[in-house]
Image: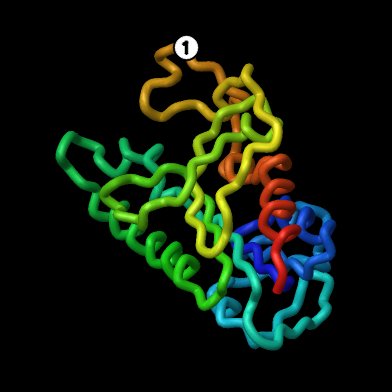
């Protein structure tokens, strides 16, 4: 299958798809960190969504897609969408930050462009969004501890023509991967990174990426 993995510089999902023999490409506006520039498209993903396109991967090779993509897996930026940003969206009780709300609406428009792309199989991954953003209803909630990692990090999936992900390796002893912006630190909550960067926050766990590839691409036919 021809698979486009949007907003993925880590190439975690792309690499797993390639292992199964699929023509998968990561796409982001920054350089890839996954070690495979030959599979990475450094540009805005929106012009590619309709298929029938040409693009150059970071190794300088030109590729052409005739027809539509068979699958889109996307990890759109969540900075202005996520519930974790509630204290900045509502700096005072009942007061909406108009500047941040405007940025959230831009992020929502990008999310919906991915969600409504003319591609048969679509999966979008994001954390829990703010209610005020009014994203479509998600399909599934997954956790890293369901896929072999001893961490919790609530993640939502929006799916089209793809099955719900099935847990592959459930861990019962786990801790939060990220600090809570809503009082977790005050409750003594411990987490994995002390100075975790936004880039690190967004990386797909290896176990989740492997499950996506095996359950969505490995069992599907064009």
- Count of picture labels: 1
Relative horizontal placement of residue 113, taking residue 88 as reference (left or right): right
- Dot 1 crowding, Cα within 10 Å, few <14, some 14–19, many 20+: few
Identify the residue shown where x is 50% and y is 74%: 117
Please state the horizontal and vertical placement of residue 147, each as a whole percent of the image.
67, 35
Q: Quadrant of the C terminus?
A: bottom right
Identify the residue shown where x is 62% and y is 19%: 172
Q: Quadrant of the N terminus?
A: bottom right
Please state the horizontal and vertical placement of residue 141, each as a whole percent of the image.
49, 41
Q: Looking at the image, is 53 positioned above or below residue 186?
A: below
Relative horizontal placement of residue 88, taking residue 73 as reference (left or right): left
Identify the residue shown where x is 61% and y is 20%: 174
Identify the residue shown where x is 43% and y is 20%: 184
Please state the horizontal and vertical placement of residue 200, each as a whole percent of the image.
63, 41
In the picture, residue 39 is in which quadrant?
bottom right
Instruction: Return the residue nearer the eye: 121 or 32.
Output: 121
Please state the horizontal and vertical placement of residue 99, each as a whole percent of the image.
28, 55
Q: Which residue is mark 1?
A: 188
């Amino acid at each position: 299958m021809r698979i486009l993995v949007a907003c993925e510089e880590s190439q975690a999902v792309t690499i797993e798809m390639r292992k199964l023999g699929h023509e998968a490409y990561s796409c982001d506006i920054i350089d890839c960190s996954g070690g495979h520039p030959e599979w990475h498209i450094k540009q805005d993903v929106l012009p590619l969504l309709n298929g029938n396109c040409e693009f150059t991967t970071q190794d300088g090779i030109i590729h052409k897609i005739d027809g539509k993509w068979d699958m889109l897996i996307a990890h759109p930026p969540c900075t202005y969408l996520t519930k974790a940003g509630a204290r900045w969206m509502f700096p005072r009780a009942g007061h909406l930050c108009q500047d941040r709300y405007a940025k959230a609406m831009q992020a929502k428009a990008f999310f919906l462009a991915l969600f409504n792309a003319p591609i048969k199989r679509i999966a979008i991954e994001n954390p829990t969004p703010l209610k005020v953003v009014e994203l479509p209803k998600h399909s599934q909630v997954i956790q890293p501890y369901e896929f072999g990692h001893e961490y919790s990090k609530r993640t939502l999936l929006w799916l089209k023509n793809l099955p719900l992900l099935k847990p592959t390796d459930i861990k019962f002893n786990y801790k939060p991967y990220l600090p809570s912006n809503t009082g977790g630190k005050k409750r003594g909550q411990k987490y994995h990174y002390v100075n975790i960067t936004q880039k690190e926050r967004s990386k797909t766990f290896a176990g989740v990426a492997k499950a996506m590839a095996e359950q969505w691409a490995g069992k599907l036919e064009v």
